[in-house]
Amino acid sequence: MVAADWPGVDPEWSREIEVTSTSSADTPGAVRSWHLLDNGAQLSRRGLVPAGTLLCVHGNPTWSFLWRTLLAAGTDTAQPWRVVAVDQLDMGFSERTGTFRRLEDRINDLGDLTAALELDGPVVTVGHDWGGVISLGWALAHQEQLAGVVLTNTAVNQPAGSPIPPALRLALHPAVHRWGTTTSDTFLRVTHALAHPPLPADIRGAFMAPYRSADRRAGVGNFVADIPADPSHPSYPELKRVADGLRGLRVPALMLWGPRDPIFSDRYLKDLIGRLPHAQVHRFEGAGHLVAEDRDIAAPVFGWLAGLGRDDASGLQLTGAKSGAPELERNAGTHQPGTGVPPLWAPLTELAAGPDGGDTAVAEMATDGGVSRSLSWRELEQNIAVLAAGLQQAGVGHGCRVSLMVPPGVDLTVVLYACLRLGAVVVVADAGLGTLGLSRAVKGATPDFLIGIDKALAAASVLGWPGRRISVRELPAARSRLLGVETSLDVLARGGRSLSQETPSDVQHPDAGPGPDAPAAVLFTSGSTGPAKGVLYTHRQLAAMRDTLAVTLGIRPAARLVAGFAPFALLGPALGAVSVTPAMDVTAPRTLTATALADAAAAIDATVVFASPAALRNVLATMGSLSPAAHDALGRVELLLSAGAPVPEPLLAEVQQLLPRASLHTPYGMTEALPVTDISLEEIRVAEADAATGTMAGAGNGVCVGLPVHGAKVAVIPLAADGTAPGSHPLTEAGVTGEILVSAPHVKDAYDRLWLTQRESIRTAGWHRTGDVGHFDAAGRLWVEGRLAHVVTAPGSVVTPVGAEQAIERLSDVGLAAVVGVGPAGTQAVVAVVETVPPARRAGPAAPQLAGRVRKAARLAGVSVSAVLAVPSQPTDIRHNAKIDRTRLSRWASRVLAGGRPGTP
């Protein structure tokens, strides 16, 4: 197989070079032959001057072919880069030396090669697998030339107390090692099988090409044997030298990671982030060990290179250094006394110290309708203080990530605010993500501690979730050992209380509090439009969210809140509001009954209720069992909030009958910015009347979500003919449909370890691009028309789904409706999928009469429907029980309309 046969490789890149070795593995003066893929000559021939050099180092058992997309991009990009992708000695098409080369030798070898190439700065190293360690070893030794480092699925340290991955243990086993790595090609085939999706045959063939015989695979076996499995290994000191050296490496860094990797899992990524905390990180969900094959890494690498020296590239600023070795300053939030930003818990502390400190602050409901537990403001403050002291003694402190898997109530409130006061970063991923989504979220966040109830700890044990485990209640010794639990909140609180008797001031202020720009929380999106994304908030942004809610909705201290949605239960103390969670499964809103809601309202004489649309539907469905006393309790509610999905006016009208004194509001927002706009039932009716009469320009075609909340600005980027929003100039004029943008003090800080997603979301400077689509009317009200990802590109038109869906849902025999596109972009057919009332016996084409009514309703909304399918129930997200998975429905509809078996969507 020659270079002309390698897919994606220009034969002009392939070259060989003789290099004099200085490695201790060779005799003095030995000359070694290296094979490279190098686009330098091609750039020169074209008269292109590269901005620098990418030095790409493969791992085991790949070769320079792994970096072909970078070579192509470096040649074709508007800003060319020379790309030198090496075949390490004994690997790829480089010389088989007949020697055993250890890590130190390989780092030295790379230095010999770059010296022979007369490689000068600026150089950015790129490494994968054990090539990552070698590239970093070179980087540390050549900092005068170094401009940055790029890492993909690699490791420089084996975390204490954890064994090396099982696959590597097997490969190192004496009974397996030689046969598995050298005599046979098993190690290569197993590695290639880690690709997601599977490698095409020609790509697999190219990766196998240099290793066709056992004598060509000796380097593969030696590479495995040189893995420093423990401190006694000869290469361990060199690995430790590289690992320790990274903490002082002050150049921009980019990490592109495939989390579906049985070798270099997220724990190795966490270790690297700890050593290079300024690095930009992107985890490609679903990608694995061969991330350069699973995903396009060329675009992000060259996008990052284009921003070197700017804040958007690395979170660092170049401050007058030489081109090869820039000095860097971190743009990080640090403690800033006197900033005037009250911490999130300020109202709680004030109430505890005031005359109302003995009043109830937080309560839990029992299934029999009574209050099972409660704390006053003073007790809540004291419990938070002693638990914070206990947690600090256990090692929780500034920057520690703590995953909280505790149901809303007293325990969660206490531990949440204790962690925040310590400067820990709380990770909130709820069971509403489903088992797979929850597991993916927790593993991606890599918490240092996991605090949970017994059920959560059992899941952590079975599913391998990271973090030192702490139970809520003290467990029997045998159960603790089984679940790997170190201690409990009960034990830590007792320890903190003992400490308070010795040094009370230390308990009240266990350590210097976090600054307003320090990270505070990672909250996860619902996962209704793809894998749930972690959203990072600072203390400043959480405090701004609190203040926005207080001002917009008039929630003040002394308000009494029934929270049927977990985030609002947690914000209650921050608002100074008494809070109670009704007896329900908060991860399944449909479990809220009218009786449970009334019991909770009666327990605290509630003035505010928050419940999702799905929860409200079940409340209305079960209201027949309410007693007169229950009706009285609900009749005293002054404000109802419902969000998470569009809330139809008829549903709100029914709720108004149940809560006759309440002002009904449906704030619009998202995990990244909550809330963005707000509207009341009365305002909805005005907006819908404007739409029906045509008296207001822009009114109609979507859900009216009202005006921007206090401190927020909202705009749109117009949609193009292909259904995208490529522009960069925000508009607020009436009737222009586009992607919705928001700017506000409470917008998220960043997506967690999703650098590409974050970069896309802020590509319009000063704005967060929400991924939602909508328009303004002449009164400045926002109308939401759906998600950008769900826009249908029909021949000659762009169709947003929500307006037609609303029209269809007005039919008496239709529950939820979804409008999706089927077919190639630009020529898609518009298909309506309806949930029938009563539920259809099976999914498939709708009955002709129903299909006709659906088409007519959609036509009145300006949408021509090509086909109508019926389902017993729509696929919705678990958290809200309301967000329809239109992408999944589109795939299902395509299959059905192509003649496939309907099955379940």
Image: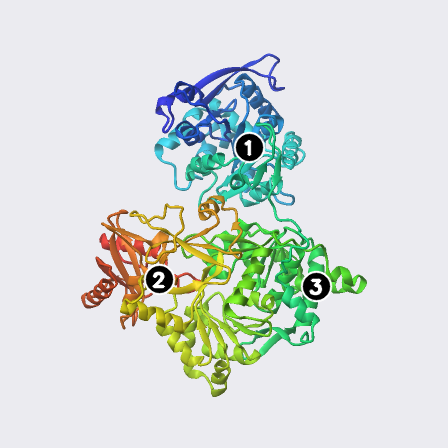
Q: Which residue is mark 3?
A: 385
Q: Which residue extends farthest top?
A: 29
Q: Earlier in the sequence, mark 2 or mark 1?
A: 1
Considering only vertical position in the picture, is 88 above or below 641?
above
Identify which amino acid the numbered label 1 is placed on.
Gly
Horizontal and vertical percent for residue 597? 49, 76
Considering only vertical position in the picture, is 822 above or below 237?
below
Q: Residues within 10 Å of mark 1 (few under 14, many from 20)?
A: many
- Which element type, helix, strand or loop, lies under badge 1? strand
- Which element type, helix, strand or loop, lies under badge 3? helix
Horizontal and vertical percent for residue 290? 46, 37
Q: Which residue is mark 1?
A: 148
Choose top left, top right, bottom left or bottom right for residue 694.
bottom left
Q: Describe residue 473's horizontal placement relative to residue 634 as left or right.
A: right
Disc ID at residue 778 = 2
Horizontal and vertical percent for residue 9? 38, 26
**Label 1 – label 3 distance at C-alpha:** 43 Å
**Label 3 – label 2 distance at C-alpha:** 51 Å
